[in-house]
Image: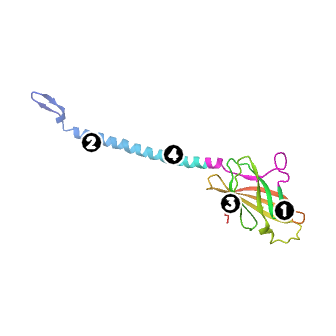
Amino acid sequence: MGGWHGVTGWHGWDWQGWSALVALGTLALAGVTFGLVRMTRGLVTATAALAVQTQADVEAQWVPILVGTPSGEGFPNPSVRLEGGDIHIALRNVGRGPVVNIGARIGGSPRNNDWHTIAPGEWSWLTVDHTKYTSTLDPDETVWDLDLRVVYADVSRQKVYATHAWLKAYPRDGRVERGTIAYEGPPEFWT
C-alpha cells in the first residue's frame, strides 16, 4: 500500500501494487489491440473479395457481343455479299462495350485483321478475303459451305471474344447467304 510520510501525509506512489495494475492494463490493451487486428484482417479480406467481384461485374457489363444484322429497316439488305475475292458481312454490336481489334478467318485461312471499332448498338461491314481459303475448293462446286470465325477484343484489349458465322457461297453466280451467326464468348484459341 501507500506509505505515510510524517509531515506530508499519505503518499500513494509508494504503493507496491502499481506495477501489477500497469501490467494488467498493458495486458488488457494488448488483448484489445489483438482483437482489432483480427477484425481489420477480416475486413481487408472481405474488401478484397468484394473488389474482385466488383471487377468481374464491371467487366461483364462491358462485354461486346457481335451478331448478324437483321434484314430490314435501318440495316443492309442483303446483310452479306460476295464481291470479287471479298465477303462483306454486316455485324451489329448488341453488347454494352465497344468492339475493337476485329480479326476474321474462313476455315483454316490466315487471319484477316480489320482494325475499326464498332460502338454498342451500332453495326458495320466486316470485309474478309476468302480467296486464300476458297482457292483450295473446287470452283465448279455449286455451293461452298464457309465457316467464318470473327474474334475481337473489348476496350481494355485484355479480353477476347468470338462470334461464329456459317455462310453458303454460290461461286457461279457470286451470291452468298448467311446462315446462323452465334456469339461464342471467349475463344479457346486463336492462331
Note whether 147 is above or below 118 in the view shown: below
Callout 2 secondary element: helix
Note whether 62 is above or below 172 in the view shown: above
Callout 2 environment at 10 Å: few (<14), some (14 to 19), or many (20+)?
few
Which residue is under mark 2? 23
Q: Position of residue 160 (x, y in %)?
A: 66, 57
Kind of residue at disc 3: Pro
Figure quadrant of the C terminus? bottom right
Instruction: Answer with left or right where residue 25 lies relative to residue 110.
Output: left
Which residue is under mark 4? 47
User: Which mark's residue is nearer the viewer, 1 or 3?
Assistant: 1
Figure quadrant of the N terminus? top left
Residue 14's image quarter?
A: top left
Note whether 86 is above or below 43 in the view shown: below
Of the two numbered discs 1 and 2 on the same chain, state the one appearing first in sequence.
2
User: Which mark's residue is nearer the viewer, 4 or 2?
Assistant: 4
Which residue is under mark 3? 187
Q: Position of residue 64 (x, y in %)?
A: 69, 51
User: Which mark's residue is nearer the viewer, 1 or 2?
Assistant: 1
Question: Which segment is the magenta one?
Answer: 57-79
- Disc 4 and disc 3: Cα gap in Å? 31 Å
**Are the residues flagged by discs 2 and 3 in contact, CB closer than 8 Å?**
no
**Residue depicted at 30% across the width and 39% down the height:** 25
Which residue is under mark 1? 168
- Please state the total of marks drawn on the protein image: 4
Q: Main secondary structure of the magenta part?
A: loop
Q: Position of residue 24 (x, y in %)?
A: 28, 41
Was residue 78 drawn as part of the magenta stretch in this picture? Answer: yes
Of the two numbered discs 4 and 3 on the same chain, state the one appearing first in sequence.
4
Note whether 2 is above or below 134 in the view shown: above
Of the two numbered discs 4 and 2 on the same chain, state the one appearing first in sequence.
2
